[in-house]
Image (spheres, rainbow, N blue to C red):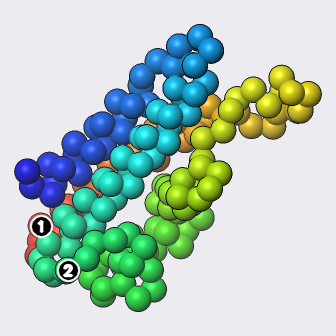
């Protein structure tokens, strides 16, 4: 499988997980949270695959997003473009990286939507993560198409 095919496959699988019905039984909330975190993990793999894909011409040894998108990353045009996105707080990539960092933390990123049931006022729904991730993936696909175009010129 080519890096491009793998990136596409991982994005598709991330979207599939988000589309799975959680159900309304006692495990529904846990299934929703698992689907969200699983989809986010697949999005991370897709990001790694994308980085491998758009830097193929540079023959890099490593493709870790933390390294390549950090200040010490390689000076490749596609990576510079992605670093600019990371620096914009309202971009899909800044949002994704923030969620990936939370995913790797001890608390994870998915939240229960039942905060109000414990006497708390809910200011945001835990279910919003799935919707935000869907929007992120859609924006990512648009950006990926542009990055691929630039990368193919090399």
Q: Which residue is mark 1?
A: 152
Q: Which residue is mark 2?
A: 61
Measured as percent of width and height from the top left, residue 113 is found at 70, 29
Measured as percent of width and height from the top left, residue 94 is found at 52, 62
Q: Earlier in the sequence, mark 1 or mark 2?
A: 2
106 relative to 55 in the view: left or right:
right
- Neighbor class of circle 1 (other Cα within 10 Å; few <14, some 14-19, many 20+) is few
Say which of 87 and 8 sits in front: 8
33 relative to 62 in the view: left or right:
right
Dividing the picture into quarters, in which one does residue 4 lie?
A: bottom left
103 relative to 46 in the view: left or right:
right
Q: Which mark is residue 108?
A: none
Q: Residue furthest right?
A: 119
Measure how far apart labels 1 and 2 are at the Cα level. 20 Å
- Marks 1 and 2: which is nearer the front? 2
Q: Residue furthest left?
A: 1
Q: Residue at x 23, y 51 (%)?
A: 7
Judging from the image, what secondary structure is the residue with disc 2 in? loop
> Looking at the image, can residue 131 be seen?
no
Q: Residue at x 22, y 42 (%)?
A: 9
The quarter in which the C terminus is drawn is: bottom left
Measured as percent of width and height from the top left, residue 55 is found at 20, 73
Judging from the image, what secondary structure is the residue with disc 1 in? helix
């Amino acid at each position: 499988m080519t890096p491009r095919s793998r990136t596409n496959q991982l994005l598709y699988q991330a979207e599939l997980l988000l589309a799975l019905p959680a159900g309304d039984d006692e495990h529904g909330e846990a299934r929703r949270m698992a689907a969200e975190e699983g989809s986010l993990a697949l999005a991370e793999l897709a990001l790694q695959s994308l980085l491998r894909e758009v830097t193929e011409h540079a023959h890099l040894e490593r493709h870790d997003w933390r390294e390549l998108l950090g200040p010490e990353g390689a000076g490749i045009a596609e990576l510079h473009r992605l670093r600019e996105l990371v620096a914009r707080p309202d971009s899909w990539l800044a949002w994704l990286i923030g969620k990936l960092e939370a995913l790797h933390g001890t608390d994870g990123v998915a939240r229960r939507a039942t905060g109000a049931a414990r006497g708390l006022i809910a200011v945001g729904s835990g279910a919003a993560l799935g919707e935000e991730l869907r929007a992120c993936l859609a924006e990512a696909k648009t950006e990926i198409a542009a990055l691929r175009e630039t990368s193919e010129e090399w």
